[in-house]
């Protein structure tokens, strides 16, 4: 069963304030830390990376009263220390392979491709064009093509990558929803 | 080959698990502390995935990528999406940019047009009216034209010429604004997911006598030390049974929460259920949860129950056995 964040509004506000007294900046830092934790756990080969990341945040929230006045330094490093402990515990408990996607039925690759087609069709024309053109070439031709695209859109290559990354994130979410709708209908 | 920065090389080595322990710790700390670096890692991760999907990774790199990325469900899903997208792009071929989004470069404006573009104010409107008069009576407006030219030169000299750095900053500002919007949406989504999960949990508890094809079977288990001891129950799952509800009698009620891990007779985990609270049912302390019947083919199963300690650790709290019979 997926762990849920033990977030009450009050504990969340306290956490954000500890990360940065300016709420918007605290919120951004929180999202970066959470995504960073998930990335660290995925790269360490943990199949339940999101659960471990949320468990890390839960523990930090639990310790907030103790550390908020005494801790000095970047709060992100404190999260890292807690994450190290969580990972060690995970390794000790792990005696068998964890199930993959335990809440999902066995996926049909054909269905995934159909979902991708439908989701691409839903994109704005400009986004659809961009995602197609970004991946058209390979190797060195790809590099030149992407510079050309950045020039056409009047953005830096980095900004172009971010835009494509966002389009792909939206596609991923759309495909998951499409897949779930397809499972319910079976 | 495009020259890579030191950061990009470090990130690639990180993703392919080539870093030393000290380097790894440094990179992981930076992942949490530096949002810009994190986004760079995610972009490189995506790029590497697409290189793999296109068959551009070979030899050692390919092996390292597979060992690193195909070890988790998220990595597998990422690779599948990349392969599907590469296939789609190959089949779709080149496309032309949509006409509506394609903007022609604006022609440079003459000083009367720049004048008209200035923020509306009573003084500006008056100047615009004077500019029109100039076109009609040359002599009278000439003096005004000279004055207006001086004002325009003053305004444009205050505005710095656009430079690439400014452009980049503008783009980064737009990026940040988009991220702010994503942040608000992400928080809202988390709250909605929580509400949906609570509703689903409440609905599953209330559902007892559902329509045919959606019924629930139940078993009550007591702990046994080895297979054969205790009471191994049979769970009969007919075609219409959607879920199996399981009640575990607690040997001791020492913990506030429990975790149940269900294994098949090969020792493979079928499902785990976390944060189970002990309840009183008919004067016994029990924990309860349910499983989709689809996860349970015919065979023998073991449930390992673990108490969750205050510091988040797990302690064994009993094993339970049951057999699924399919009808």
Image (tube, rainbow, N blue to C red):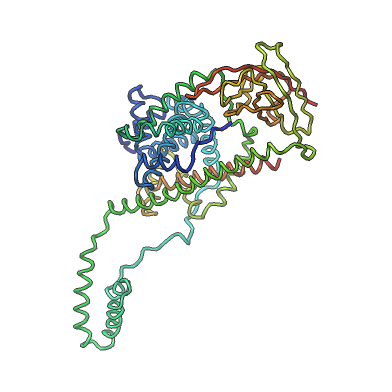
Q: How far from the left and from the top, in percent, is residue B303?
A: 64, 20
Image vertical order of residue B265 relative to residue B4, above or below: above
**A116 and B242: which is toward the camera:** B242
**A52 and B320: which is toward the camera:** B320
Image vertical order of residue A13 relative to residue A151, above or below: above
**B44 and A93: which is toward the camera:** A93
Query: At 47% from the left edge and 62% from the top edge, which residue is drawn?
Result: B100
Give the quarter of the image for residue B22. top left
Q: Residue furthest front?
A: B283
Q: Is residue B127 left or right of residue A17?
A: left
Q: Quadrant of the C terminus of chain A?
A: top right
Query: At 32% from the left edge and 51% from the top edge, which residue is drawn?
Result: B168
Query: At 70% from the left edge and 11% from the top edge, which residue is drawn?
Result: B229
Q: Is residue B5 left or right of residue B51?
A: left
Q: How far from the left and from the top, in percent, is residue B148?
A: 22, 77
Q: How far from the left and from the top, in percent, is residue B287?
A: 64, 26
**A135 and A14: which is toward the camera:** A14
In this figure, what is the number of numbered marks? 0
Q: Quadrant of the N terminus of chain A?
A: top right
Q: How far from the left and from the top, in percent, is residue B164?
A: 28, 52
Q: Is residue B34 left or right of residue A137?
A: left
């Amino acid at each position: 069963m997926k762990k849920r964040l033990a977030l009450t509004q009050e504990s969340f506000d306290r956490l954000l304030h500890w990360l940065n007294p300016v709420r918007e900046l605290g919120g951004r830092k929180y999202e970066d830390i959470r995504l960073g934790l998930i990335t660290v756990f995925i790269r360490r080969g943990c199949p339940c990376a999101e659960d471990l990341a949320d468990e890390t945040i839960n523990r930090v929230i639990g310790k907030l009263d103790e550390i908020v006045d005494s801790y000095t330094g970047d709060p992100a490093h404190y999260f890292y220390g807690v994450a190290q402990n969580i990972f060690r515990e995970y390794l000790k408990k792990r005696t068998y392979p964890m199930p993959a996607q335990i809440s999902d039925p066995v996926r049909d690759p054909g269905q995934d491709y159909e979902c991708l087609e439908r989701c691409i069709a839903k994109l704005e024309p400009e986004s659809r064009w961009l995602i197609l053109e970004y991946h058209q070439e390979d190797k060195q031709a790809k590099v030149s093509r992407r510079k050309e695209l950045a020039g056409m859109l009047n953005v830096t290559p980095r900004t172009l990558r971010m835009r494509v990354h966002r389009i792909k994130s939206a596609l991923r979410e759309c495909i998951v929803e499409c897949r779930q709708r397809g499972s319910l209908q079976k | 080959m495009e020259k890579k920065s030191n950061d990009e090389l470090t990130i690639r080595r990180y993703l392919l698990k080539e870093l030393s322990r000290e380097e790894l710790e440094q990179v992981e700390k930076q992942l949490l502390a530096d949002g810009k670096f994190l986004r760079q890692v995610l972009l490189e991760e995506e790029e590497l995935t697409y290189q793999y999907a296109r068959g551009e990774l070979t030899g050692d790199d390919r092996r390292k990528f597979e060992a690193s990325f195909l070890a988790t469900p998220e990595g597998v899903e990422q690779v599948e999406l990349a392969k599907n997208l590469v296939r789609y792009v190959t089949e779709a071929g080149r496309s032309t940019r949509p006409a509506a989004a394609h903007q022609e470069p604006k022609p440079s404006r003459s000083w009367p047009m720049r004048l008209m573009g200035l923020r509306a104010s009573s003084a500006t409107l008056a100047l615009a009216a004077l500019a029109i008069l100039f076109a009609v009576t040359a002599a009278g407006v000439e003096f005004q034209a000279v004055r207006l030219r001086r004002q325009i030169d003053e305004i444009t000299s205050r505005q710095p010429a656009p430079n690439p750095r400014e452009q980049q900053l503008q783009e980064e500002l737009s990026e940040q604004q988009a991220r702010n919007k994503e942040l608000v949406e992400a928080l809202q989504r988390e709250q909605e997911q929580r509400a949906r999960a609570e509703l689903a949990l409440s609905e599953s508890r209330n559902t007892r006598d559902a329509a045919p094809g959606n019924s629930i079977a139940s078993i009550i288990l007591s702990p046994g030390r080895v297979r054969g001891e205790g009471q191994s129950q049979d769970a009969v799952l007919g075609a219409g049974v959607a879920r199996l509800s399981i009640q575990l009698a607690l040997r001791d009620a020492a913990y506030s929460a429990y975790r149940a891990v269900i294994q098949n007779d090969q020792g493979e985990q079928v499902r785990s259920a976390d944060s189970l609270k002990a309840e009183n049912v008919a004067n016994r302390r029990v924990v309860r949860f349910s499983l989709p019947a689809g996860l349970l083919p015919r065979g023998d199963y073991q449930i390992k129950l673990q108490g969750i300690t205050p510091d988040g650790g797990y302690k064994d709290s009993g094993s339970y056995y049951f057999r699924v019979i399919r009808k």
